Image (tube, rainbow, N blue to C red):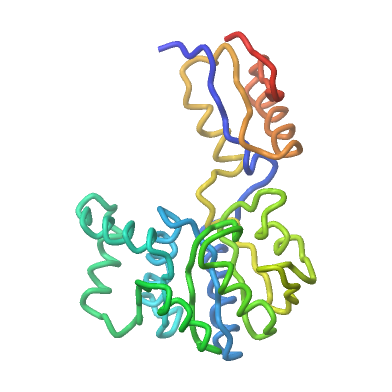
Amino acid sequence: MFRFAEPVLSTYGDRLHKTLADTESELIDVVTSTLSAHGNIVIPAFAVGRTQEILFLLIDLVKRNVLPHLSIWVDSPMATAATHLTQHFFSQLDKESQSTFEWFKKNPGAVDLRFIADVEESKALNKIKGGAIIISASGMCDAGRIVHHLQNNLPRAQNAIVITGFQAYGSLGRRLVDKAAKVRLFGEEVAVRASIHTIGGLSAHADQAGLLDWLRGFKSAPQSVFVVHGEPEASAVLAQSIREELEWKNVIIPERLHTYTC
């Protein structure tokens, strides 16, 4: 069927992700070094999808004996509900995920996984000074319980903040990725002494190669391609790559308040 117009998300249109093996190595290094230093690992993550994938990956790394026993707290009511929903539809998961989940059910002591229910339990996590992996929303750090965990953990050098998704310009997560020395949380300046680790391979968004591969699946070129959902540089690089590699001519980066005819 002919497509008159196709939107393409250019979030990572100007870069390539590391391989899964390299991504896992990054995560293993951060977790082992931080736990060895008796620090906490704080992971901002979107509640639906991203949190569950991170959990599966961490459990799988323990299963493969490349990570030690882990203590993981999921502090997000929505993430908790989404995880329980994932369990309910367990049979719909891929075989690898089913295998990991079955292993975890048979070896519950290998990972101490806890889901935080209420605000008081969430506040109690502030008492943990080391050895914890805290996964909380929102993914860009601008709202939700993650802000409290950052306030508590950013000032301590033995801690690590692991960024697993795209951080939009202007967000708190982006300021951390851009190596801000201080950030303002709840009206107070908080020193950033914890290490900040961006692991792009854990993002849900495809990189440039993935986007181009997806576009190659079209039987015929759309009449128009609109490059959206990206910062200007990423959108420009992807648009040019589409023109050069696929030889599609009508590639548009839409401008605000403009009307386009497809």
Please name the residue shown 43% across and 57% down the image: 47
Q: Quadrant of the C terminus?
A: top right
Place of residue 258 in the rendered image (x, y in percent of width and height, measured from the top left): 69, 17
Q: Quadrant of residue 88?
A: bottom left
| Image height of 84 relative to 75, above or below | above
Q: Quadrant of the N terminus?
A: top left
Place of residue 68 in the rendered image (x, y in percent of width and height, measured from the top left): 43, 84
For this orientation, the residue located farthest to the front is 187
Left/right of residue 123 with respect to residue 184 in the rendered view: left
Left/right of residue 169 with respect to residue 127 in the rendered view: right
| Image height of 175 relative to 217, above or below | below
| Image height of 60 relative to 211, above or below | below
Place of residue 247 in the rendered image (x, y in percent of width and height, measured from the top left): 66, 19
Q: Count every numbered label the image shows and give the total.
A: 0
Place of residue 124 in the rendered image (x, y in percent of width and height, measured from the top left): 46, 84
Please name the residue shown 62% across and 41% down the image: 11
| Of 52 and 202, the residue lying toward us | 52
Left/right of residue 91 with respect to residue 34 in the rendered view: left
For this orientation, the residue located farthest to the top is 261
Q: Quadrant of residue 111?
A: bottom left
Left/right of residue 127 with respect to residue 224 in the rendered view: left
